[in-house]
Image: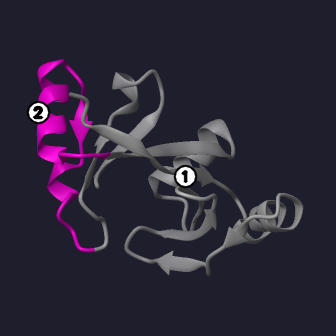
Amino acid sequence: MSFYKRINHVFIAVNSIEETAKLYTDVYGMESSVIISSLRLGLRSQKIFTGNAYIELVQPLDQDNAVAKFIRERGEGLYLIGIQVHNLPAAVKALEEKGARVIGKDMAALPDHGAGVFLHPKSTHGALIRLLED
């Protein structure tokens, strides 16, 4: 049985949330949340609602975090795909047994992180994938 449930969200790394959100709301007609800032993560973010999933625009607050590095090296664009799974521990175990490189297990229980882990881009042909408990 597959433990995958659905795509929950995608992160798009941007230089300006305000400029990018205007495109999604004014041109594409989507609804958005308020902008929030996380000093701990060094990011600003805003959700764009798309039905049963969402797009999250993420903008670095400083140049020392992973999102800033991503934009410097690759430009703005798709940064992360979040996939809900039915049983996160079982999914992690099965993927590791098959050679997937799972990262972030130590952060999975942090209150503002949510129950989730990441599949390293080197295990996924360049895509950062976050697995979340449903």
- The answer to which of marks 2 and 1 sits earlier in the sequence is 1
As for residue 104 lying within the magenta part, the answer is: yes
Task: Residue under label 1, please give it.
Answer: 11
| Amino acid under disc 1 | Phe
Residue 48 as seen in the image, left or right of residue 23 = left
Q: Is residue 134 above or below residue 22?
A: above
Q: Nearer the viewer, mark 2 or mark 1?
A: 2
Do residues under tags 2 and 1 come within 8 Å of each other at their CB atoms? no
Q: Identify the residue at horizontal 74%, vertical 64% (top origin).
A: 30
Quarter holding the C terminus? bottom left
Please give the name of the residue rendered at 30% of the width and 65% of the height, measured from the top-left corner: 113
Direction front: furthest residue: 1
Which residue is at a point 17% across and 18% down the rendered structure image? Answer: 98
Q: Give how far across and how far down residue 97 sits, in percent.
A: 11, 22
Which residue occupies the extreme right position in the image? 27
Question: Could you tell me the amino acid type at mark 2?
Answer: Lys
Neighbor class of circle 1 (other Cα within 10 Å; few <14, some 14-19, many 20+) is many
Residue with the mark numbered 2: 93
Tell me residue 38's x, y (percent): 45, 76
Query: Would you say residue 128 sits in the magenta stretch?
Result: no
Left or right: 72 in relation to 88: right
Residue 29, relative to residue 100: is it above or below? below
Q: Is residue 96 left or right of residue 18?
A: left
